[in-house]
Amino acid sequence: MKIAVYGSRRQDEHLSEIETFMKRLSELGFEVVMHPKLYKYLRAVMLPALGAVRRVTGEGDFTADAAVSIGGDGTFLRTAMWLEGKNMPIVGVNTGHLGYLTALGVDRLPEVPDMLLAGSLESERRGLIEVVSPELPTWPYALNEVTVSKDDSASMINTRAELDGNLLAEYRADGLIIATATGSTAYNLSVGGPIIQPQTPVWVISPIAAHALTMRPLIVSDCSTMVLCPDARAEHFRLTVDGRSVSLPVGTEVTLRRAPFDVTVLHLPGATFSETLRNKLHWGVD
C-alpha cells in the first residue's frame, strides 16, 4: 500500500508518536511519499525511522492509496492543495488546536497504518469552490471559504453579487465570505454565520461587519454560479482562497462555482456530526 504524508514542521512535542508511526509503516511494508518540508524536519531528528519513504516531492505528480495529514485544520487544507485534486482520501491527525477537520488525536497516529490496511476508516466527500479570476493563487480551489475584503483599514467595500445571472445584492461591508458547508465552522462562524452539516451541498454567504442590518447570512445551493465585483475608495481589494490571498484592482470580477472534484475525508467508524459539535465546539455546554 502506498500513502502520502504531509505535516506541519512544528511537531517537537509529538516526535515519539510520529517515530512510532513511521516505524509501523516500514513494518507493514508501506511505500511513502512525503512532502519535502516535513521530510527535511524529520530527517534531522529521526532519520532511521524514515525507511518507508520512497519519494520526497512538493508537487502533486504522484499517486497513492491515501494521504495522512499531521497538524491542524490549516495543515489539512494544505494537504488537499498538495494532492492537487487527486481522488485520494485524507485522514487528518490533530496536533494543532481545534482540529475540526481532523479525525484522530495524535495519540492514535501510530494506529493509522493498521487502520488503513484494514480499511476500517469510513469516508465522506466534501465539495470545494472553484475560483475564476484574472489573477489567482496557484491553487484556485477552496475547501473552506473564499473571501473578498478591503485591502486597507480605511474604508469598507461595496461588492455587487450576482447569483446565477441575477442580481442578489450590493453588499456594503468590510468584506464578504462565501463558505462551503465544511468551512461553515471557520471564518463564517466567527462573523455570525450558521453551522452547516458538512455533507450538505450548499454555500453560505456571510458579510463581514455589514453596513446594513438587513444584510444577513444567506444559504444557497452549491450548484449555483456566483459573480462578485468589488468596488471601493481604495484602488485594490483582497481576494483570499483558504488563507492564500492576492490583491486585485477594484472592479475585477470573481466567479465562483462548484469545483469539478471533491475531497474525501476519512474518519473513525460511527463518528457523527453531532459528536464533533459536542467534542470540538462544546455544543450545548453551559
Image (tube, rainbow, N blue to C red):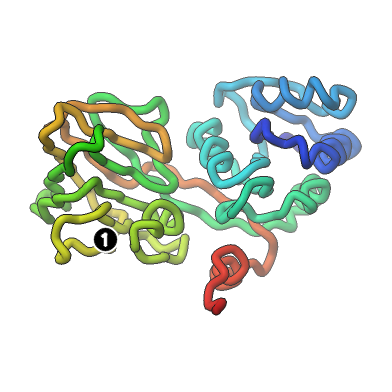
Q: Is residue 179 above or below residue 281?
A: above
- Position of 22 with respect to 208 (left or right) is right
Q: For mark 1, what is the residue?
A: 220
Which quadrant is the C terminus positioned in? bottom right
For numbered disc 1, what is the local secondary structure?
strand
Q: Position of residue 210 (x, y in %)?
A: 20, 56
The amino acid type found where label 1 is placed reads Val
Q: Is residue 275 above or below residue 250?
A: below
> Most extreme residue toward the front, as rendered?
154
Say which residue appears at 22% left-offset and 64% top-offset.
216
- Position of 267 with respect to 229 (left or right) is right
Of 10 and 94, which appears nearest the observer? Answer: 10
- Give the quadrant of residue 139: top left
Q: Is residue 65 visible?
A: yes
Q: Position of residue 269 (x, y in %)?
A: 69, 65
Say which residue appears at 19% left-offset and 28% top-offset.
236
- Give the quadrant of residue 259: top left
